[in-house]
Image (tube, rainbow, N blue to C red):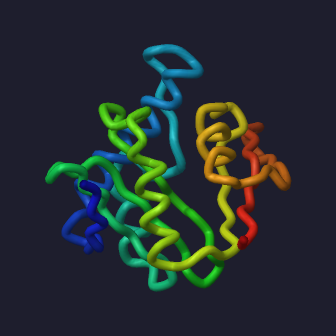
Amino acid sequence: MIELIEATIEEQEKITEIMTASFNYDTAFYFGKDATDGPEGYSDGSLATKILTDSTSQTWLISYQGEIAGFLTIDSQKWEVQYFCLFPLFINQGLGTKTWKKIEEHFGHRPWFLETPAYSTRNHAFYEKLDFAKVGEKEYPNGSKSFLYEKIRR
């Protein structure tokens, strides 16, 4: 059973642990076992603190069979999925899809937006399975690129 538990600042260390494991796992999958990378502050706690203190965002811990499996952060003003991270142990088990269904049950079917790394083809496949469509690309000064996705209300 999946449960979404509203996260508070007290979960900053757990969010950081999930982010670090998730981003590093994804990076290593594409660039080799020793590769690590993620958004600024993802592994030192500063990004988790920023997420958990942002008044426009909502963050939930994802509990699966009583164990914390990941977290999800959305901006409910822009309807943007900001972070959707799972511990690597829980990837490819249908947990992401079930979690997303809970989000749609809670908020209803509406337009959603998100950004994901261009290299992360597994993320692309996951979001496309959830009926998101690639609508653009974004390039950063450091040379990295991401894809922009949108899910239209049905």
Residues 126 and 143: in front is 126
Name the outermost residue toward the front: 154
Quadrant where the C terminus sits is bottom right
Residues 42 and 134: in front is 134
Q: In the rendered picture of this protein, how many numbered marks are placed on residues?
A: 0
Spot occupied by residue 124 in the image (x, y as percentages of width and height): 67, 40
Q: Quadrant of residue 15?
A: bottom left
Q: Residue at x 49, y 22 (%)?
A: 28
Q: On the picture, is 91 further left or further right than 63?
A: right
Q: Residue at x 80, y 47 (%)?
A: 139
Spot occupied by residue 143 in the image (x, y as percentages of width and height): 77, 37
Q: Is residue 141 above or below residue 118?
A: below
Q: Quadrant of residue 153?
A: bottom right
Q: Residue at x 62, y 52 (%)?
A: 130
Quadrant where the N terminus sits is bottom left
Q: Residue at x 33, y 40 (%)?
A: 87
Spot occupied by residue 145 in the image (x, y as percentages of width and height): 75, 41
